[in-house]
Amino acid sequence: MTITFGNKLRDWRTSRHLSQLDLAATAGVSQRHISFLETGRARPSREMVIHLAATLDVPLRQRNDLLDSAGFAPAYRERGPEDEQLTQIQGVLAQLLKAHEPFPAYIVDRLWNLVAANEIATKLIALALPPEADPTQIQGNVMRLMLHPAGVRDAIVNWEAVAGVLVRRLAREVAERPGDNDLAELLTEALGFADTAGINLAESAPRADELLVPIVLATPLGTLETFTTIATIGAAHDVTLEELRIETLLPATAEAAELLQRLMTG
C-alpha cells in the first residue's frame, strides 16, 4: 500500500493527540481543508506542507519526508561527512566537549550513535567496560553500550532504574516520530536487552525522577555517583544539527567530583 501525504499527515496529527479541529484551529485553516488533505481530495501547496509540519512540531528529517510524499523537493539540508561547514561545526563541538572536562560529555545522533566524546568520557567508558568486551556488539551506539550485556551494564549499580529511563525515553522518541523505522528497530532491540528491568512503556511522560537521571558506576577507583543532563543544538534549517544531542555526566557528590579529577589526570 502506498503511503500518501494524507496518511502521513493523519499519523502526525494523531501522534500529537490532536483532532482535525484542533489542528485546523492551531494552523489557522479550515477543518474541511484538513479533512480533504488527509483523504487525498485536496493537494497541499509546498507552503502548506511546511506550515502544517511546523504546527505539528515535526522534526526536520520527517518534514522533508512529508514534502517528498506531497511531490516537493526537500526544504532542509542534511550534511554529509564531506561537507566543509560540517567539519567546522565538528571543531566547535569538540571545543564544547573539551570545556566540560573533567566531567564526561558526549554527542549522539537521533539513533543514539556516538558522534564524539571528550577524553574523560572515553576513559570512563574504557574503565567501565568488561575486559572481554567485544566492540562489534556495541557498534558505537550509546543505547547498546548501556543496555547490552557486552557493554557497561554490569558496572551500573542501579542498572534496572537506568534501563527503565532509557527505554521509556526511546519509546517516547519513537511515538513522537511516526514512520521512523530505524528508531523503532532500535527500541525493539533495547526492549530485548532490558526485558528483566520491569519497564512500563505506558508511562508516556517523563517522571520527576527522570529529569536528572542518576547513574551509579562501580569502577576500580571506587563508586562514581553521577546524574545526566541532555542538551540539543538549535538549528532551524539543518537536519544533521537538529538531530544531535549533548549528554553530560555531572558528579552527584564531592567524592565523585574528586574521582573524575583523578581519572582525568591519569
Image: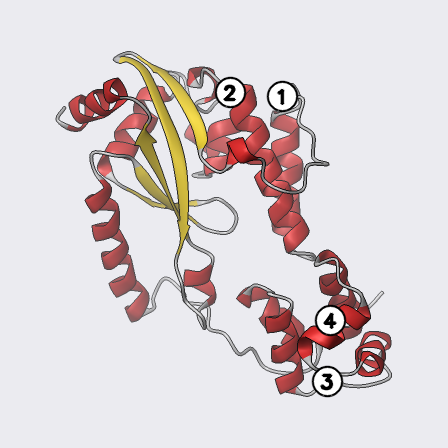
Q: Which mark lies nearer to you, 1 or 4?
A: 4
Which label is found at residue 240? none
Mark-to-mark CA distance, 1 and 4: 38 Å
Q: Which residue is mark 4?
A: 23
SS class of the residue under badge 3? loop
Asked if residue 197 is positioned above or below residue 70 in the image, the reply reads: above
**Residue at (47% x, 57% y) in the render:** 243
Mark-to-mark CA distance, 1 and 3: 45 Å
Asked if residue 171 is positioned above or below residue 82 in the image, the reply reads: above
Q: Which residue is mark 1?
A: 197
Mark-to-mark CA distance, 3 and 2: 48 Å
Mark 2 or 1 closer to N-term? Answer: 2
**Residue 77 in the image, given as x and y percentages of width and height:** 46, 73
Mark 2 Cα shell of 10 Å, populated few (<14), some (14-19), many (≥20) = many
Mark-to-mark CA distance, 3 and 4: 15 Å
Which label is found at residue 159? 2
Residue 196 appears in the figure: yes
Mark-to-mark CA distance, 2 and 1: 8 Å
Mark 1 Cα shell of 10 Å, populated few (<14), some (14-19), many (≥20) = some
Q: Which residue is mark 3?
A: 44
Does residue 194 appear to the left or right of 251 in the view shown? right
Q: Which mark lies nearer to you, 2 or 4?
A: 4
Mark 2 or 4 closer to N-term? Answer: 4
Mark 1 or 3 closer to N-term? Answer: 3
Residue 46, image quadrant: bottom right
Asked if residue 69 is positioned above or below residue 227 in the image, the reply reads: below
| Quarter placement of the C terminus | top left
**Amino acid marked by disc 4:** Leu
